Amino acid sequence: MKLLERKNYPLASERLPEIELNTLFAQAVLNLKVEGSIYVNDIGNPETFYVSHPYGMSLLFGTTEDKEFNSRLKDYLLDQSRSRKKREWLQVHPASWNDILCDLVNGRVTDYTEYSEEMEESAILMRVRQCRPSHLIRWERVNFEFRNLPGGDNVEVDRGYRLSQIDPRSYDLISGSVIPANFWKDKETFLSSGIGFILTEDENMVSASFSSFFEGNELELGVETSEPYQGKGFGRFVCAELINYCLRNDLEPVWSCNRMNIGSYCLARSLGFEETLCLPYYELVREAG
């Protein structure tokens, strides 16, 4: 696995259109909207690509036959150096990579779908924690397609709340895990190239929805709600505002999530997204549980 220089990123970009799954996070890296990394099998004539986004999402695509690359990939997947500090999730294309990954790690793949119909969620998650230091965890990643924004079930926002477009001041109010700072290179890049809306109460963030990725006419939604306000419909409220912005500006709203993320999955369905594609999604080996 050899690090590709930025000047050669177009070699990877030109291959993305052949991939059917949602690649917006990889495009963000290739278009330098975030500081990521790209590894290839051959610097001069790359045929295999590994695109890594700093939020912990990766995309492996291209030819599957390079033995040297695959050997180094195996070490990386299994974290042989024990250097992985945070979770990383990998998607692959073409589908033949799925069997190759399993062979590379000598079958050390724990597939949660094997337990999902027989075990309670708490038991599945315990099993995952036990396997995480030595196995790839195979989840499912759902891609959605937006159909229409349903009416009704709107949250009543009283006068104590304020809805506004994210600006330099309100950007600094956004905290949590799914926030612009984790998806964009810096504040300035988001404010110049992204879009989002925030609901506040007394200068505190209630909920925010924003473009986690924004490429061409496709805008992928990210949403975060402060803990005291969760479960009250505020996330749906701010997402609907961003979707309406997309519709007014001829943009396509995009949504993807881990199928086990029931909150995100149900929120997407309530906003008019329909599941179109479900693919393997690998959590890489990590020592910490």
Image (tube, helix red, strand yellow):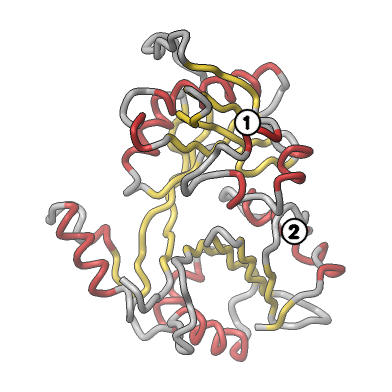
Q: Circle 1: is it few (<14), some (14-19), or many (20+) Cα within 10 Å?
A: many
Residue labelled with disc 2: 30
Q: Is residue 17 visible?
A: no
State the residue in front, 36 or 117: 36
Q: Which quarter shows the C terminus?
A: bottom left
SS of the residue under disc 1 = strand
Which of the 4 image quarters holds residue 136? bottom left
Q: Up-down: is 14 above or below 253? A: below
**127 with respect to 132 (left or right):** left
Q: Residue 196 carries which label?
A: 1
Which of the 4 image quarters holds residue 192? top right
Q: Which amino acid does label 2 sit on?
A: Leu
State the residue in front, 171 or 71: 171
Which of the 4 image quarters holds residue 119? bottom left
SS of the residue under disc 2 = helix
Q: Is residue 85 visible?
A: yes
Marks 1 and 2, how far apart at CA: 22 Å
State the residue in front, 157 or 184: 157
**185 with respect to 262 (left or right):** right
Location of residue 63 in the rendering, given as x and y in whole percent from the top left corner: 64, 74
Q: Which residue is drawn at 39% across and 31% down?
A: 267
Q: Which residue is drawn at 21% across and 54% down?
A: 116
Q: Up-down: is 135 above or below 263? A: below
Q: What residue type is labelled 1?
A: Gly
